[in-house]
Each structure stands twice: as C-alpha cells, then as structure tokens.
Image: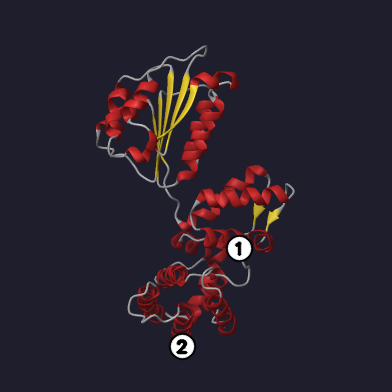
Amino acid sequence: MDEVKQLVNDIKNKNLKPIYFLMGEESYYIDKISDFIESNVLLEEEKGFNQMVLYGRDVSIEDIVGNAKRYPMMAERQVVIIKEAQDLSRTIEKLADYVNNPQPTTVLVVNYKYKKIDKRKALYKAIKKIGVVYESKKLYENQVADWIRRVLSPKNYTISPKAAQMLVEFLGTDLSKINNELEKLQIILPKGSQITPEIIEENIGISKDFNNFELRKAIGERNIIKAHQIVNYFADNPKDNPMVVTVALLFNFFSQLLHFHGLKDKSPRSVASALKVNPYFVNEYIAAARNYPMRKVSAIVSILREFDVKSKGVGSNAVPQGDLLKELLVKILS
C-alpha cells in the first residue's frame, strides 16, 4: 500500500515515467493505478487526441509500439493504456525493443493482470532501468481484515472485527469485490459510522449467526447445540454455504490450533503474532485449546483431510454434502 501511495504521489507531482508495467495476481491496485493515470495525467481537453485505451485481445505488440511512437497533438504528452495485456503473454517480451528506446512524450501503461513477466528476461530488466514495474501481490486471508480497516479509515468509517471477518469469509481475498461492497455501505451510512455484523447482514445478505465464522467459534467452544444448528442451516442452504469452503476454514483453524499447542509463549500478543490473527480472536484459540488437546487436534486435522477429499466428490458415493457435513461435525465433537 505504501508503494501505491508513493506511485500516486509521483504521478500527482508530474514525476512521470515513460512506462508503467502493472502486473500480479491481485487486480485491485492494478486498476487503481491505471485509473488514476487515466484520470489525472492529461487535462480533459487534451484527452480526445492524446489518450487511448487498447485491449490486449484486440492488438499486437506492433500495434502498441505504433501507437506509443506517435507524437502528442497540442499537448506535452500522450497516454497509451493497454488493458488485459495478459492476453499478449506469448509475445509480451517483444515490447523490450520499444522500452530500450521509448518515446519520451508517451506514458505507456500496461495492465498485466493475474500473471507476472519473467524477471530474468530482457523486458523486465529494460523497464526497471527507465520505468516502473509494480507487482500487485494477493493478500493472505489473515491480512485482508487489516486492509479493510486501512481502506475505511481515511474515509472516516470503522468496522468491527467480526464484521470484517464476515466479509473475508463471504468474499474471500478478492479486494475488488470487498471494496465494491464497502462502497455500497458508504453510500447508505453517514460518515463516522461503524460497520457492524448487523449492517453486513441487512445490506449484503451474509447471516451474522449462521456462517463459517460462527461455526468455527461454536466448535471451538464445544457449543454442540449451536454447531448443529449452523450445520443444519448449511445443509438446507448448500449453494450459499459450500462444504469445500467450510472444510478449508476448519482445517485452517485446527492447523493453527496445533501451532498454538506448540507455542512456549501463550500470551495474547505472542499468539496473535505467531498465528497471524487479529488479537480480537486470540481468546477463541485459548478456549479451543482447553477443549481440544494436541492429540485430539491432530486427529481432527486428519479427519478434515479425509472430508476435504469427500467434499470434492471423491469416495463419497454421491452422499449429499449436507449429510457429509453433519457426519464431519459428529466426528469432530466426539
């Protein structure tokens, strides 16, 4: 995020590079940087003749170079933006010849999503000498809640830890999807508001009581009634609660619990750091560790591996996923 801020500040201050190669698994920041350049480098009256957006599936490297070599009309520079450039992955290295001799009045922006160019090859080395290579890496699940808080803070909103966790569970680590939902909430909520689980449930449709987060908590506390209620709800609503997601989350939880048992320092701060979880959730691990000794946790991890395979249709003889999930819960709690 700091690298993005520095890039944006440089662009604002007209400290422009001849090429911006934006690549990586996470598309959110690629789009943000590209959109910022598209909106801010040229004046509105300059854009008609001097700004063009091309798509990788529609052009060749030769087309891109031909457009980049043009001179601006009645402006200091032109901007050429290539979207979905990953469609040119087989020929992208040919762009190195242009990068070695770029048009100084052109700002070329290449959006190369979900992939990376080979850092050992000529194109990467050439861009690094005269331009910017920005790699947008996918966040780990345990990093996304902090990212949500950082995004909301400058806009004068806060979010409760549980609400942030609900978004991560429901939307995964796709920052664009999460940001879209956050922007919808900001439209209806006054500045200074805190986003709560109730607000998430009412406006996004994620149940605050029947979700994987609450199932994990109920299992950790050995709250058998609540755990069975949630699993029954999942069985009745399988499309909204795929078993493969539930098993993955529980596997991650018990793997962390195994790690917890091996820690020498079990103070909340040390646990949060070691397990890479929000300190708000540390008490859940402490409570679960009391209910599940290390030997039991090891057995549960093995059970979860078995049911992960079954949830994907291997060796389950077409057993409904709701029934598999109920069987899994019995084995965990037995």
Q: Using the image, tell me which numbered label, if any, was put on residue 162.
A: 1
Q: Is residue 249 left or right of residue 146?
A: left
- Please give left or right for residue 144 compared with residue 307 in the image: right
Q: Which comes sooner in the sequence, label 1 or label 2?
A: 1
Q: Nearer the viewer, residue 257 or 137?
A: 137
11 to 23, vertically: above or below: above
Where is residue 252 drawn, in percent x and y?
Answer: 43, 68
Relative to 166, is 60 above or below? above
Res. 278 in view: no
Instruction: Determine the residue located farthest toward the bottom in the rendered image.
Output: 334
Q: Residue at x 40, y 72 (%)?
A: 258
Residue at left 27%, top 30%?
A: 94
Count of numbered labels shown in the rendering: 2
Q: Which residue is mark 2?
A: 334
Residue 223 location, x and y as percent? 57, 82
Q: State whether residue 15 is above or below residue 56.
A: above
Q: Position of residue 134 (x, y in %)?
A: 41, 36
